[in-house]
Image: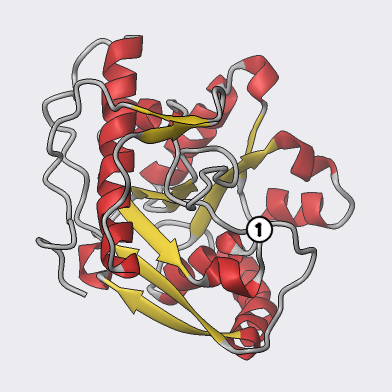
Amino acid sequence: MTESAGLRAGYFAAAAAVRPTLNAIMSKEWQGREHLPEGGFILCANHLSNLDPLAVGHMVYSLGYLPHFLAKAELFQLPVLGGMLTRMRHIPVDRARGGNESLLAADEALASGGAIIIYPEATLTTDPDLWPMKAKTGAARLALRTGVPVIPVAQWGIHEVMPKPAKAPKPWPRRTGRIRIGAPVPLEDLRGSALTRDVLDAASERIMSVITGELEVLRGEPAPEGRWNPRTARREPILGRQDPGGSSPERGTP
C-alpha cells in the first residue's frame, strides 16, 4: 500500500470513533476474507441500509485496506461530513456531469493499492424482497477500464439494525451484521472490449448475479427469477444471462 502516513492517521482516528459504536449496536460475522487480493481492488456490494457504508468500511479497514467510497457529490457539500469525506479521499460522483472526474479519482486510489467501494445499484434497493436490483454501469465501466479485480460482497442483517426508513440504529434486540466476500467476478472475456452499452450491461449483470449468489448463501434461500428494475418498479427477465461462476446456495460454503 502506498497511501500517505497522514491519510492513514485520518483513517485511524475515524476508526477509533466508528468501531466501538458499531461493536456496541450489533454483532458481526465476516466470511470469505481470503478472497481479498493484494493491491487495489473494486468491492461491489448490495445496498440495504444507510448503515451499510460504515459496516463495510469497518470490515475493509479491519482487514488491512483503506476503503474509498464513491458517494453522491451532495454529501461533500454538507458541514463537517463533507470535509471529512474529502480529507479521507472518498470520491464524489456528480451524475449531472457524467462521472468522468470520479473515475479518474478512483483510478488514482486503485493505483496506490486502495479499495474502491461501490454500490452498483447506486441507491438502497427498492426490491420488495430486498434482493439486489438492476445495476447502474459505473462499477462495470471502472472495472473494465482499470483491469483490477472486482470483489463481490453480500450483506444481510445490517438492515435490521437500521431499517430503510429509520434515522438512527435500533440496537435492541441485538442483531448480527453478516458480510460475505466472494471470489473475484470473472470479467476477463470482456476486458479489452469497446465499452459499448451491451458490454457494460453484461458486466454489470454479471457483477449483480455473483452478489446475488453470495446473498443466497447468507439468506439460505434462492433469489426469485428476474431482476427488479427500479425504473419500471417490477421484476424483469435477465436477458442473455450467463453463469458467472459465482457462488450459489449449492456451490457456496458458509
User: Residue 94 occupies which quadrant of the picture?
Assistant: top right
Q: Is residue 241 left or right of residue 49?
A: left
Residue denoted by label 1: 50
Residue 121: x and y, percent? Answer: 50, 38
Q: Is residue 192 above or below residue 6?
A: above
* Res 195 visible: no
Q: In the image shown, does 179 or 219 lie closer to the viewer?
A: 219
Residue 28: x and y, percent? Answer: 46, 82
Residue 3: x and y, percent? Answer: 48, 57
Q: Residue at x 43, y 63 (%)?
A: 155
Total tally of numbered discs in the picture: 1
Q: Residue at x 21, y 70 (%)?
A: 34
Q: Is residue 48 left or right of residue 184?
A: right
Identify which amino acid the numbered label 1 is placed on: Asn
**For numbered disc 1, what is the local secondary structure?**
loop
Q: In the image shown, does 94 or 135 lie closer to the viewer?
A: 135
Q: In the image shown, does 129 or 88 lie closer to the viewer?
A: 129
Q: How crowded is the residue under tag 1: few (<14 C-alpha within 10 Å), some, or many (20+)?
A: many
| Quarter of the image with the N terminus in it | bottom left
Residue 253: x and y, percent? Answer: 15, 71
User: Residue 191 occupies which quadrant of the picture?
Assistant: top left
Q: In the image shown, does 149 or 164 lie closer to the viewer?
A: 164
| Quarter of the image with the C terminus in it | bottom left
Q: Is residue 193 above or below residue 25?
A: above
Q: Residue at x 30, y 63 (%)?
A: 181
* Res 236 visible: yes
For the rendered model, the colour scheme is secondary structure
Q: Is residue 51 above or below residue 244?
A: below
